[in-house]
Amino acid sequence: MHLHVTSTPYPDRVDEFDRWYSEVHVPDMLAVPAVKSCSRFRLTDPDGPVRFLAVYAVDGDDPAALLAELGACAADGRIRPGTASDPTATRIEFWKSWDAPSAEAAPRAGAHADPGPENSGAL
Protein backbone atom coordinates (compact mmCIF):
# COMPACT_ATOMS: atom_id res chain seq x y z
CA MET A 1 0.00 0.00 0.00
CA HIS A 2 1.09 3.59 -0.52
CA LEU A 3 0.23 6.67 1.47
CA HIS A 4 0.02 9.84 -0.65
CA VAL A 5 0.12 13.21 1.12
CA THR A 6 -0.26 16.51 -0.72
CA SER A 7 0.74 19.67 1.13
CA THR A 8 0.61 23.37 0.35
CA PRO A 9 3.02 25.52 2.33
CA TYR A 10 2.17 29.12 3.10
CA PRO A 11 3.61 31.24 0.23
CA ASP A 12 6.13 33.05 2.44
CA ARG A 13 7.27 29.86 4.21
CA VAL A 14 8.08 27.45 1.36
CA ASP A 15 11.77 27.13 2.29
CA GLU A 16 10.91 26.56 5.96
CA PHE A 17 8.38 23.89 4.98
CA ASP A 18 10.86 22.13 2.71
CA ARG A 19 13.56 22.11 5.41
CA TRP A 20 11.15 20.77 8.04
CA TYR A 21 9.83 18.09 5.70
CA SER A 22 13.29 16.93 4.63
CA GLU A 23 15.11 17.22 7.95
CA VAL A 24 12.36 16.41 10.47
CA HIS A 25 9.22 14.89 9.02
CA VAL A 26 10.64 12.31 6.62
CA PRO A 27 13.06 10.92 9.26
CA ASP A 28 10.20 10.83 11.79
CA MET A 29 7.99 8.95 9.34
CA LEU A 30 10.74 6.50 8.36
CA ALA A 31 11.20 5.63 12.04
CA VAL A 32 7.64 4.21 12.07
CA PRO A 33 8.01 0.44 11.51
CA ALA A 34 5.25 0.25 8.86
CA VAL A 35 6.75 3.06 6.73
CA LYS A 36 9.38 1.70 4.35
CA SER A 37 10.29 4.61 2.07
CA CYS A 38 9.38 8.13 1.02
CA SER A 39 9.60 9.89 -2.34
CA ARG A 40 8.88 13.61 -2.60
CA PHE A 41 7.63 15.59 -5.58
CA ARG A 42 6.91 19.25 -6.32
CA LEU A 43 4.14 20.38 -8.64
CA THR A 44 5.63 21.86 -11.81
CA ASP A 45 2.76 24.24 -12.65
CA PRO A 46 4.46 27.67 -12.56
CA ASP A 47 1.08 29.43 -12.29
CA GLY A 48 -0.29 27.26 -9.50
CA PRO A 49 0.35 27.26 -5.78
CA VAL A 50 3.52 25.62 -4.54
CA ARG A 51 2.37 22.12 -3.75
CA PHE A 52 4.25 19.04 -2.69
CA LEU A 53 3.45 15.35 -2.84
CA ALA A 54 5.00 12.72 -0.61
CA VAL A 55 4.52 9.06 -1.50
CA TYR A 56 5.25 6.64 1.32
CA ALA A 57 5.54 2.89 0.72
CA VAL A 58 4.00 1.21 3.74
CA ASP A 59 3.49 -2.34 4.97
CA GLY A 60 -0.02 -3.69 5.39
CA ASP A 61 -3.30 -3.05 3.67
CA ASP A 62 -5.37 -1.48 6.44
CA PRO A 63 -5.52 2.33 6.18
CA ALA A 64 -7.32 2.66 9.54
CA ALA A 65 -4.60 0.70 11.35
CA LEU A 66 -1.87 2.82 9.78
CA LEU A 67 -3.68 6.05 10.65
CA ALA A 68 -4.01 4.82 14.23
CA GLU A 69 -0.29 4.03 14.38
CA LEU A 70 0.65 7.42 12.91
CA GLY A 71 -1.76 9.17 15.30
CA ALA A 72 -0.14 7.43 18.27
CA CYS A 73 3.30 8.51 17.02
CA ALA A 74 2.11 12.11 16.69
CA ALA A 75 0.50 12.03 20.16
CA ASP A 76 3.68 10.89 21.89
CA GLY A 77 6.03 13.16 19.91
CA ARG A 78 7.65 10.58 17.63
CA ILE A 79 6.19 12.48 14.65
CA ARG A 80 6.74 16.20 15.16
CA PRO A 81 4.30 18.66 13.57
CA GLY A 82 5.25 21.42 11.19
CA THR A 83 3.69 24.87 11.11
CA ALA A 84 4.63 26.16 7.65
CA SER A 85 1.80 24.59 5.63
CA ASP A 86 -1.93 25.10 5.44
CA PRO A 87 -3.53 22.10 7.20
CA THR A 88 -6.84 22.72 5.37
CA ALA A 89 -5.04 22.14 2.07
CA THR A 90 -3.40 18.86 3.13
CA ARG A 91 -4.86 15.74 1.58
CA ILE A 92 -4.11 12.16 2.63
CA GLU A 93 -4.95 9.19 0.41
CA PHE A 94 -4.20 5.48 0.53
CA TRP A 95 -3.49 3.60 -2.68
CA LYS A 96 -3.34 -0.17 -3.03
CA SER A 97 -1.51 -2.00 -5.80
CA TRP A 98 -3.69 -2.98 -8.70
CA ASP A 99 -2.75 -5.70 -11.13
CA ALA A 100 -3.66 -4.27 -14.51
CA PRO A 101 -4.28 -6.68 -17.39
CA SER A 102 -1.10 -7.62 -19.20
CA ALA A 103 -0.29 -6.07 -22.57
CA GLU A 104 -1.08 -9.41 -24.25
CA ALA A 105 -4.59 -9.41 -22.79
CA ALA A 106 -5.30 -5.76 -23.62
CA PRO A 107 -7.18 -4.97 -26.85
CA ARG A 108 -5.14 -3.73 -29.81
CA ALA A 109 -5.03 0.01 -30.44
CA GLY A 110 -8.21 1.02 -32.23
CA ALA A 111 -10.01 -2.20 -31.27
CA HIS A 112 -13.26 -1.92 -29.34
CA ALA A 113 -14.11 -4.49 -26.73
CA ASP A 114 -17.71 -5.25 -25.78
CA PRO A 115 -17.93 -4.13 -22.14
CA GLY A 116 -20.73 -6.57 -21.36
CA PRO A 117 -23.36 -5.85 -18.72
CA GLU A 118 -21.02 -6.57 -15.80
CA ASN A 119 -18.44 -4.02 -17.02
CA SER A 120 -20.59 -1.23 -18.40
CA GLY A 121 -20.53 1.11 -15.39
CA ALA A 122 -18.35 4.18 -14.89
CA LEU A 123 -14.96 3.74 -13.31
Image (cartoon, rainbow, N blue to C red):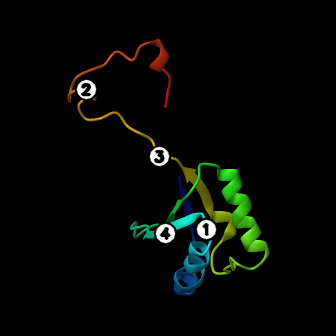
Tell me which amino acid carries mark 1.
Pro
Distance of mark 1 from mark 3, alpha carbons? 20 Å
Q: First in sequence, mark 1 or 2: give its number.
A: 1
- Mark 2 vs mark 3, CA separation in Å: 22 Å
State the residue lying farthest toward the right: 75
Please identify, in this view, whether the residue under mark 2 or under mark 3 is nearer the observer: 3
- Within 10 Å of the Cα at label 3, are there few (<14), some (14-19), or many (20+) other Cα atoms? few
Q: Amino acid at mark 2?
A: Pro
User: In terms of secondary structure, where does tag 1 sit?
Assistant: loop
Three-letter code for the amino acid on which mark 3 is drawn? Ser
Along the line of sight, the residue nearer the viewer: 19 or 26: 26
Question: Which element carries disc 3, helix, strand or loop?
Answer: loop
Q: At 75% across and 80% down in the image, what residue appears? A: 77
Q: Up-down: is 70 above or below 77?
A: above
Dot 2 and dot 3 residues touching (CB under 8 Å)? no
Kindly report which numbered mark, 2 or 4, lies closer to the viewer in this rendering: 4
Mark 1 → mark 2, Cα distance in angstroms? 42 Å
In the picture of the structure, the residue carrying the numbered disc 4 is 38
Task: Quickly name the residue at label 2.
Answer: 107
Disc number for residue 33:
1
Q: Position of residue 50 (x, y in %)?
A: 49, 72
Pointer 3: what residue? 97
Of mark 2 and mark 4, the one earlier in the sequence is 4
With respect to residue 121, does 50 lie above or below? below
- Sort mark 1 into few (<14), some (14-19) or many (20+) by Cα contacts within 10 Å: few
Residue 23 visible in the shown view: yes
Reading the chain from its start, which is encountered first: label 2 or label 3? 3
Element type at mark 2: loop
Left or right? Give the position of 80 relative to 50: right
Q: Earlier in the sequence, mark 3 or mark 4?
A: 4
Query: Is residue 120 depicted above or below 45 in this figure?
Result: above
The residue located at (50%, 22%) in the rendering is: 121
